[in-house]
Image: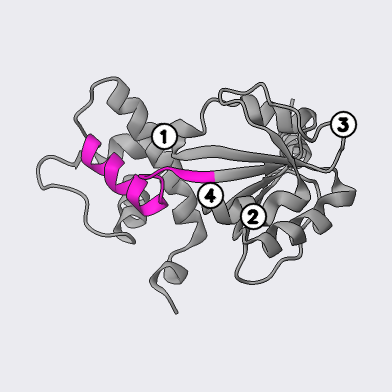
Amino acid sequence: MGKSENIPLPAVRRLSLYLRQLEAYADENHRTISSRQLGEVLGLSDAQVRKDLAYFGQFGHPGIGYRVPELIQRVRRILGTDKLSRVLLVGAGNLGRALIAFRGFQKRGFELAAVFDKDPDKVGQMTDGPNRLKIWDLSEMPAIVRKHSIRVGILAVPASAAQQVAEEMVAAGIRGILNFAPVPLQVGPDVSVASVDLAIHLEQLSFELNSVAP
């Protein structure tokens, strides 16, 4: 069993929260931060912060706490975003075009390198995002994945097409899928899937609001 398999998934997810807050502190010219300060703003205990970071090594300095620039660099390295990774997108509909226009990819260590769709009216068009990209037919995916060494793909297609397209992505060499389709994907154990279902989040918020006594 690899080392990463022994780390609880919630701790890994919280790393991203720590990174966002550390970057906010860096923007405000904070040079050091304590586990208590970092935890308070995120609604966590200082013990939880220390425990989470301890899974990945030793970070603090006695009498100082954490050096913000140093911790940002190390967390980025752990998450693999300290170097630019190329990403592809399948689906150039309304959601896909909103993702294409998103300017935060590169800041987070990702470059949208290719866009695919099966609609012949869209194939061959150029996108309107920060980097103008040609929309390719799905049949071109294996060659482009190899050419650009792409391992991560974003899936933004209708639910009815999601499983088939996911299988094509995996066959092309994609090993991580960010799934915006509101259906679970059946992929092999060597492929990681993270699903984003906006309706579920809204339903959870609705439940919490309706559970609060008036």
Q: Residues within 10 Å of mark 2 (few under 14, many from 20)?
A: few
Question: Rounded to the nearest whole Å, what is the CA distance between mark 2 and mark 4?
Answer: 9 Å
Q: Residue at x 42, y 75 (%)?
A: 2
Which badge, 4 or 1, is on the more N-terminal residue?
1
Q: Dot 4: what SS?
A: helix
Q: Quadrant of the N terminus?
A: bottom left
Which badge, 2 or 4, is on the more N-terminal residue?
2
Question: Rounded to the nearest whole Å, what is the CA distance between mark 4 and mark 1?
Answer: 28 Å
- Compared to residue 200, the image places residue 52 above or below, namely below
Kindly identify which residue carries mark 1: 20
Which tag is nearer the camera, tag 4 or tag 1?
4
Q: Which residues are drawn in magenta?
A: 69-86
Give x and y (percent) for residue 166.
75, 56
Q: Residue at x 29, y 58 (%)?
A: 54
Q: Quadrant of the C terminus?
A: top right
Identified by mark 1, the residue type is: Arg
- Compared to residue 164, the image places residue 111 above or below, namely above
Q: Please, what is the dominant secondary structure of the magenta stretch? A: helix
Q: Visible in this render: residue 98? A: yes
Which tag is nearer the camera, tag 1 or tag 3?
3
Which badge, 1 or 3, is on the more N-terminal residue?
1
Q: Residues within 10 Å of mark 3 (few under 14, many from 20)?
A: few
Describe the colour scheme in one phrase: one colour
Q: Dot 1: what SS?
A: helix
Identified by mark 3, the residue type is: Asp
In contact (CB < 8 Å): disc 4 and disc 3: no
Question: Rounded to the nearest whole Å, what is the CA distance between mark 4 and mark 3?
Answer: 25 Å
Q: Dot 2: what SS?
A: helix
Q: Residue 102 sits in which quadrant?
A: top right
Kindly identify which residue carries mark 2: 143
Give x and y (percent) for residue 85.
47, 46
Kindly identify which residue carries mark 3: 121
